Image (spheres, grey):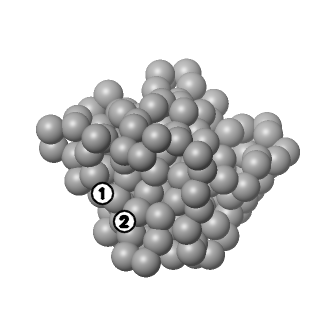
Amino acid sequence: MSLTVSAAAGQCSDDFADLRWEGGKARFAVELADTFDERAMGLMFRTQMPQFSGMLFIYPEPSKVSFWMKNTLIPLDMVFLDQTGLVTKVHENTTPQSLEAIPGGENILAVLEVNAGLTRRLGISVGAQMRHAAFDQGGAAWPCE
């Protein structure tokens, strides 16, 4: 499945995250969470999110990350990415308001949260690549053009 949103091909912006994988491509309108406070708040207390939207958590450097769903009211899929923009883990269908830890693994630079079920429906899995301005373009798996 593929989603096309009008934008100049290959251009990166903070407002969109492009993903590609064997057999598909998608573009998500994203809100950035790139400060400690923004990452701590995440998508808490929201009751809905548009279908091809999400939140992109960016860390200052690759690290071990873990999430929980405290005060998060909508089920989500979480896409964990390394410093090159390569998807290393996908966690599907989180449980709203759960305090259970959701480990993302080591060396994670970014995490994309989208509506639950969307990653499976589109076919996004480990090995997919993200294009976004947050990744060092010199080492990006899918650099901006």
Image vertical order of residue 90 relative to residue 63, above or below = below
- Seen as rendered, the residue at the extreme right is 47
Under circle 1, the secondary element is: loop
Q: Give the position of the N terminus as an image quadrant.
A: bottom right
* Closer to us: 86 or 63: 86
Residue 48 falls left or right of residue 120 = right
Residue 47 in view (yes/no): yes
Q: Categorize mark 1 by other alpha carbons within 10 Å: few (<14), some (14-19), many (20+).
A: many
| Furthest residue in direction left, as rendered | 138
Q: Which mark is residue 124?
A: none
Residue 82 visible? The answer is no
Q: What amino acid does circle 1 point to? A: Leu
Q: Residue at x 36, y 65 (%)?
A: 128
Amino acid type, residue under disc 2 in the picture: Ala
Q: Position of residue 71 (x, y in %)?
A: 74, 42
Report the residue marked by disc 2: 128
Residue 5 picture location, percent across and down: 60, 50
Answer with left or right where residue 4 lies relative to residue 85: right
Residue found 52% across the figure and 59% down from its top:
26
Residue 120 sits above or below residue 64 on the image: below
Q: Secondary structure at mark 2?
A: loop
Marker count (numbered): 2
| Left or right, residue 70 beside residue 32 | right
Within-10-Å neighbours for mark 2: few <14, some 14–19, many 20+: many
Q: What separation in Å lies between label 1 and label 2 (alpha carbons)?
A: 6 Å
User: Dot 1 corresponds to which residue?
Assistant: 86
